[in-house]
Amino acid sequence: MPGAESAEKHVVVIGGGPAGLTAGYELTKFDLRPVVLEKEGLVGGLARTETYKGFHFDMGGHRFFTKVEEVNKMWQDVLGGEFLRRPRLSRIYYNGKFFFYPLKPLNALLGLGFFQAVLIVLSFIWWQLFPYRREETFEQWVTNRFGRRLFLTFFKTYTEKVWGISCSELKAEWAAQRIKDLSLKTALRSMFIKPKKTIKTLIEEFDYPRRGPGMMWSAVKSEIEQRRGVVRLNSDVVRINRTDMHVDSVVVRRDGVEEVISGTDFISSMPVTHFIKALDPPAPSAVRSAAARLTYRDFLTVVLIIDKPHIFDDNWVYIHDPGVHVGRIQNFKNWSPDMVPDPSKTSLGLEYFCTEGDKVWTMADADLIEMGRREIDRIGLARYEDVVDGCVVRVQKAYPVYDSDYREFLGVVRQFVDGLENCQTIGRNGLHRYNNQDHAMLTGMLAVRNLVLGEHHDLWSVNTDQEYHEEIRERVTEHDLEEVLEGTLTEVFLKLDRVAMGLSLGLTSGALLFLATLILVLKGGGHVGPTLGLLGQYFPGYTVTGAGSMLGLLYGFVTGFVVGWCFAFLRNATVFLYMAVVHRRAELQALRRLLEYF
Amino acid sequence: MANEKQALERMVLTRALRLNATVQGIVTGLVAGLGVFVATNWLVLKGGPTIGPHLGLLGQYFIGYRVSFVGSLIGFVYAFVVGFLVGYTVGRIYNWAVDRREHKRLGHA
């Protein structure tokens, strides 16, 4: 628990999203009174719940599913009784048919029809035999693994909608990064250790607050305030004052009035690009320039109120139809019936991926609603005339873009931020890391531990390295068991040393033949070793005599060496081939969930 | 962590497997023992005027062994012992050779 030193801390948290509010909540547990500053008039950040005429909307859909025990505990502590356990269904809607997602081969092939299925299989075989020699683009990368037809059907359109650029321009590195943690160890583990049933169950169903994720963050706000912390809405941090590498205060603009808020420590979940830009005196030009090169993808949700009690069963559907702009459709009623005030109506959230300031982003709300009505009618999910109302919600900086250069630029920014003595950045945009809500919260928790308890958690590693949080969540016994199994598996797959195997078999078989010959010679008799002597058919000059035993030693050694060497060679080749197959299979398995990374 | 993973993959690709000599001995012994046991009883069950004249030559090495059911039990014991020695020796020599070769390689690295 904190000592007197902690009590003297005045912590300012920038951002009232999951990461910032979690940090604020954790700080109050240490009897600190943080000041949380939120730019918008609503807490929750990317996980807020918007409301329109009693209809509640979740921006992007947030499942409350986590492997991080601490995060789950906080959810239950804050909102336990308000959670609903919901079944998860999310499919791809293409050509008027639903396809399971993650893709199920049989369902995909049946849904596409026999002729198309045959073409897909042939295309897959073709690209396995004649792949692109160089995988520079996302298109080449996926085509090499799935074949061109499957790429065109299930990857191209949606990916281009999300990122706004052609798959032939999107770097292959982006896809490779998504499965970069698929190490040999993971692949082998996936083949031999079955996933725990509880995890599988959690993926098939999830917890969800009755009125969306914003309900959680409103409750966290109340908890912070009850513990004498402060959450200030509509408070935009416009400047961060520092002396060398020490942050002194922030300047907040509220209703056009600026105010200086001082603190001993700062935790920021505001976009790291804005954070760097707001520093006064400014960060070095290299850092500013690097921060400016980090980009984001935004999206807007066109909410349509439909005069129908039921439309489809899914929580959300991916729209792969290239003829419409909409990328994903949320069915809020299927997340929670309480999201809709009138059971005879359904509310759908049509998500359009765009970039702030582009044509879609700047369209008038009425035009966007009209476009949504036309598109929902065109793809056949609802009729134009059944749409009775609608609204538009814009979400800035929803996705940090992982382009080919972002690592380099983020590295420069990170180095500078890490050098700040009393400030940590957290959350999806604070770290420019594609963290989900639970991992964003974890960064908030760990930042508080660093600050109050003097621990040294690397916030940038959360979610980059899956094992980081697995290590936290897993019970020691289970973790140890898996470690032992993995260690054993690794030992099994080590290669045999060909020369050593040749030597050992050669020496042993040479010695055996030598002894076998000598025993018969020493036993003597009328006709010594007629049967063993038949070896002379293969070993010229070999006889069952004293001299023959020496020759047998040599022949036995050579033959044994060759057999041992060949055995080791073939065994190694088989093992490596097997490992390649296992790795490829696990890679495909991971790729089947590719859309989920968006 | 990432380095750890790379190290693991590098280990699988570069490090050589070590054999457990005792396990290798037991397995080779059991295979050899069962081989003689089955081969002997196979001929015994087939029967005939002269049973297993060639297999019977094992008696030259395994004193007391003959092609009969009792002989199959004796043969099992003999073959197990010889098999164990062979397997154990192969395992020890292999590990020794691997150690020498790795030591040499690392020494030069």
Image: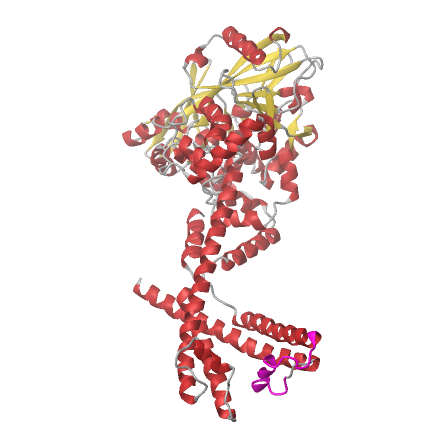
Is residue A234 inside the magenta stretch? no
Q: Residue at x 50, y 56 (%)?
A: A490
Is residue B50 located in the magenta-colored stretch of the structure?
Answer: yes
Q: Residue furthest front?
A: B49
Residue A10 appears in the picture as rendered: no
The residue at 65%/72% (across/down) is: B38
Q: Is residue A344 visible?
A: yes
**Left or right of A297 on screen, residue A486:** right
Q: Nearer the viewer, residue B53 or A588?
A: B53
Q: Check the image and report above or below for A334 versus A345.
A: below
User: Looking at the picture, how far across and down is residue A518, in whole percent?
Assistant: 47, 87
Judging depth in this view, the residue of A36 and B86 nearest the camera is B86
Return the residue found at the far bottom: A525
Q: In the image, is A343 to the left or to the right of A110?
A: right
Numbered-mark total: 0
Spot occupied by residue A598 in the image (x, y as percentages of width and height): 50, 28
Residue A565 spot, x, y in % from top left: 42, 66
What's the magenta region? Answer: B46-65
What secondary structure prevails in the magenta region? loop
Q: Position of residue A326 (x, y in %)?
A: 51, 17
The C terminus of chain B, quarter of image: bottom left
Q: Is residue A239 left or right of residue A485?
A: left
